[in-house]
Image: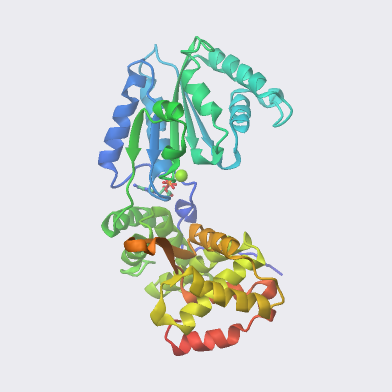
Amino acid sequence: MTLFERSEAIFEDENVLHDDYQPDSLEERNDELEQYTAYFQPVINGSQPRNIFLYGKTGVGKTAATKYLLHHLEEDAKQYDDLSITTVYLNCEDLTSSYRVAVALVNTFRSPSEQISRTGHPLNGVYEKLWTELDQIGGTVLIVLDEVDYIGDDDSILYQLPRARSNEKIERARIGIIGISNDFKYREKLDPCVEDTLCERELHFPPYDANELQNILEKRASLAFKNGILEGEVVPLCAALAAQDKGSARQGLDLLLEAGDLARRRSDSVVTEDHVREAKQLLEKQRIEESMKELTSHGHLTLLAVVSATVSRPSRVPFQKQDLYEQYTDLAVATDRDPLGGRAFHNHLAELSMLGVLNRTKRNDGRGGGIYYEYEIDVPIDAALSTLENLHMSSELDLESLWRNAKEGGLV
Ligand code: ADP
Ligand code: MG
């Protein structure tokens, strides 16, 4: 019996929609690319490179633009015999300290048989090894630290690397750092000395609007799907949905991929708007499920408290902490748990807001009212309820009546 058979009625090449696909050209980023290119000009001139800090929300093309420009820079440098350019790309997601970044850098410069282990060296020893490697390579070395905020507070590497030459740790190499971050506040958290060097040149990538997303997605869709497979409104709808939400090209591409996948699984002959809408719900649900995995049962009850409050008192949205706290303590008692204190409850609300499950707004009620927060659910109610249904504790909760009330209230 054959279990697997090739089925390619929908996609020409679905890899084109995956995140690691590097497009040949970038749409809608002319101004930013012009600026970015100018920042790299000293490299081509053979001078000391500038350190660049690139920021913008997720999915706005920061990684793609950086890889695109570095590729061109390396190619174009070949016409000048006196230039030697080495580029290194590191994503810091797993590199949560300066030590780890330094080890990763040493290892990218070394052959597989000479790798150093990830633990057990003094930090200074690793830096010494790094300076030796850098001087052996010589020339211009451009180091991209993508998602640089993951390095956290232990960021001495961001101080050491840009100063290595002026501090006479290295002689033959000129280092340029390109730091990339989604976190707008990251800059403010940096030590002023680090900020001064790392953010020597700055660049911001704003979110895309629906028209921009449509151009980006159209180009990609024409490579990914077979001809005539997409109904006319599919790409504009993906673009509009992604623009309404975060203006992220990644989100638009994910919608296209998921919609195509739904059509393929059902052996439908075309991809329609309905596939896109269903794909949106599926992706939303996945996103909440991912976030929920990180939470404790009190985190889950906190979300449930917000959902119940929204369903039973929709006219009162958004809620203040004390409205939700009562609901939460009732739920905790009903499920045989000791309710957390107000402060810990507040932390759970803050965490859910950080995960994008709740929306938190700061209010300033002058005249003695002080500062307080208001919360409302930031994901579809049905997605939140289905996520809660899949948790261990779901049998202890009365989710059925919540579903019923939500339906009656037109919330799902
Ligand atoms: P970021 O690093 O800002 O989170 P990425 O650079 O990874 O975002 O972009 C997310 C996805 O969108 C990638 O698949 C990328 O190729 C694509 N993309 C983003 N901006 C553009 C653009 N201007 N033109 C073409 N594709 C783009
Ligand atoms: Mg990125």
At a point 41% along the width and 25% down the height, the residue shown is: 197
* x and y percentages locating residue 200 in the rendered image: 36, 27
At a point 38% along the width and 17% down the height, the residue shown is: 48
Q: Nearer the viewer, residue 17 or 398?
A: 398
Query: Which residue of the protein is positioned furthest toward the front in this rendering?
Result: 368
Lateral position of residue 391 relative to residue 11, left or right: right
Q: Quadrant of the N terminus?
A: bottom right
* x and y percentages locating residue 100 in the rendered image: 62, 32
State the image quarter where residue 181 is shown: top left
At a point 43% along the width and 36% down the height, the residue shown is: 67
Judge whether residue 226 can be spotted in this image: no
Judge whether residue 178 can be spotted in this image: yes
Q: How many marks?
A: 0
State the image quarter where residue 319 is shown: bottom left
* x and y percentages locating residue 153 in the rendered image: 55, 36
At a point 62% along the width and 84% down the height, the residue shown is: 398
Lateral position of residue 135 relative to residue 313, left or right: right
* x and y percentages locating residue 210 in the rendered image: 29, 59
Up the image or down, 193 lies above or below 208; here it is above
Up the image or down, 1 lies above or below 135; here it is below
State the image quarter where residue 32 is shown: top left
